[in-house]
């Protein structure tokens, strides 16, 4: 079962620390103005409520960094520049290869892009030193999957079914889940991640995070001209906007039930320490799902000053652009 969202007890103290770091290198003024509203210390506090200060700080940095990286494509300088997006993702993959030591530093120089520099020079060295080799590889490969998922999201408008397959990669849940090992000093065996039940738990955590985020962010994304949203795609099937929101909500309920079923099948080894870490890992997946929902209402990124009232009423007014919605 999913429990009520917890928050890291020092989240208010972490916020100015995370914001100062992000503002110190974010290159675009439009992005810089968005950083305080994102409150990435809060979302990290929801995702990793029991992390120690240093790990919590780096995770807050990372989640803020991830948002800046993604906004460059979603609503930044590259939004309508397909060749630019491809070059950006290619350069990011080259950075991942360097961090995985798959390419020689002599042959692949560090990026001159300040966004990529922030990860490679400030976040990655600390994370690499604080987790196992296997966990580090899982973290970077999950990020590579996220990059590839983002690239696929910016093609032709998909069906709901096609979208769900793409969105699982682009929602950044798996890279947040991979950070659980760093957050809590886990040393989980590779065999755990190869088991079908663990794979299903990860897939469903990604689905739940994506569905919840799409519902919460729908108004903002439509205003930004982003059409890759679950609610919008349901609406394109010829139903009303209210019905589209309800269909997305049903998908959340189904995925939640399947998550609980899969979690009960994740193998336990009989080793008390490993099994305790496995339980904490599953609980961490749940905290990421519930954390993104709580953060959506607590920050100003999606609902601004109306967030508290919208959360109370469970009702949000949406202005439908005529060029996108021509049905009654």
Image (tube, rainbow, N blue to C red):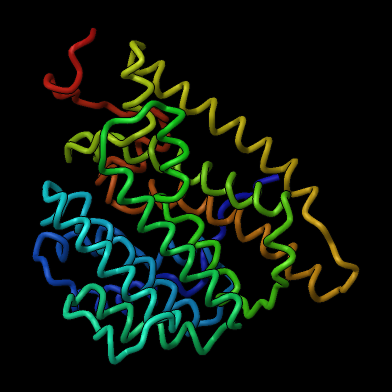
Could one spot residue 191 in this view of the protein? yes
81 shown above or below 89: above
**In the image, what residue occupies the spot 68% across and 78% down?**
187
Q: Residue 309 at x, y = what percent?
A: 35, 37
Q: Residue at x 35, y 88 (%)?
A: 104
Q: Position of residue 174 (x, y in %)?
A: 51, 57
- Residue that appears at 16% across and 61% down: 31
Q: Nearer the viewer, residue 280 or 39?
A: 280
**Left or right: 168 with respect to 123?**
right
Q: Quadrant of residue 18?
A: bottom left
Residue 218 vertical placement versus 90 (above, below): above
Q: How many marks?
A: 0
Which of the pair 260/33 is nearer the observer?
Answer: 260
Query: Is the C terminus in the top left, top right, bottom left or bottom right quadrant?
Result: top left
User: Where residue 315 appears, x then y in whole percent?
Assistant: 37, 27
Residue nearest the observer in this picture, 234 or 78: 78
Please give the name of the residue rendered at 22% of the width and 57% of the height, measured from the top-left corner. 86
- Name the residue nearer the viewer: 75 or 38: 75
Q: Is residue 212 visible?
A: no
Left-right relation of 293 to 306: right
Q: Residue furthest right?
A: 270
Q: Quadrant of the N terminus?
A: top right
Q: Quadrant location of residue 110?
A: bottom left
In which image quadrant can residue 190 be found? bottom right
Q: Residue 36: where, in percent of width, then height?
A: 24, 64
């Amino acid at each position: 079962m999913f429990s009520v969202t917890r928050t890291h007890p020092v989240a208010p103290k972490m916020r100015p620390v995370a914001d100062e770091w992000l503002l110190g290198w974010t290159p675009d003024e439009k992005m810089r103005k968005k950083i305080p509203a994102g409150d990435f210390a809060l979302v990290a506090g929801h995702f990793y409520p029991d992390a120690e200060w240093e790990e919590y700080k780096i995770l807050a940095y990372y989640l803020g960094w991830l948002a800046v990286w993604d906004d460059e494509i979603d609503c930044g300088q590259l939004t309508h520049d397909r060749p630019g997006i491809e070059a950006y993702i290619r350069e990011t993959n080259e950075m991942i290869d360097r961090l995985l030591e798959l390419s020689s530093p002599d042959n692949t120089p560090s990026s001159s892009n300040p966004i990529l520099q922030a990860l490679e020079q400030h976040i990655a060295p600390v994370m690499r030193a604080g987790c196992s080799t296997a966990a580090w590889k899982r973290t970077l490969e999950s990020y590579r999957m996220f990059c590839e998922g983002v690239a696929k999201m910016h093609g032709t408008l998909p069906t709901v079914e096609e979208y769900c397959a793409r969105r699982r990669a682009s929602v950044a849940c798996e890279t947040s889940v991979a950070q659980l090992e760093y957050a809590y000093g886990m040393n989980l065996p590779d065999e755990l991640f190869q088991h079908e039940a663990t794979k299903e738990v990860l897939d469903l955590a990604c689905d739940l995070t994506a569905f919840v985020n799409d519902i919460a962010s729908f108004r903002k994304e439509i205003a930004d001209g982003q059409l890759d949203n679950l609610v919008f795609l349901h609406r394109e099937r010829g139903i009303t906007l209210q019905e589209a929101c309800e269909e997305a909500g049903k998908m959340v309920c189904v995925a939640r039930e399947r998550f609980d079923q899969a979690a009960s099948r994740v193998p336990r080894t009989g080793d008390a320490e490993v099994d305790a870490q496995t339980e904490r890992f599953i609980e961490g997946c749940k905290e990421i799902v519930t954390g993104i929902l709580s953060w959506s209402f607590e920050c100003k990124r999606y609902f601004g000053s109306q967030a508290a009232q919208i959360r109370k009423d469970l009702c949000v007014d949406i202005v439908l652009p005529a060029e996108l919605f021509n049905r009654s």
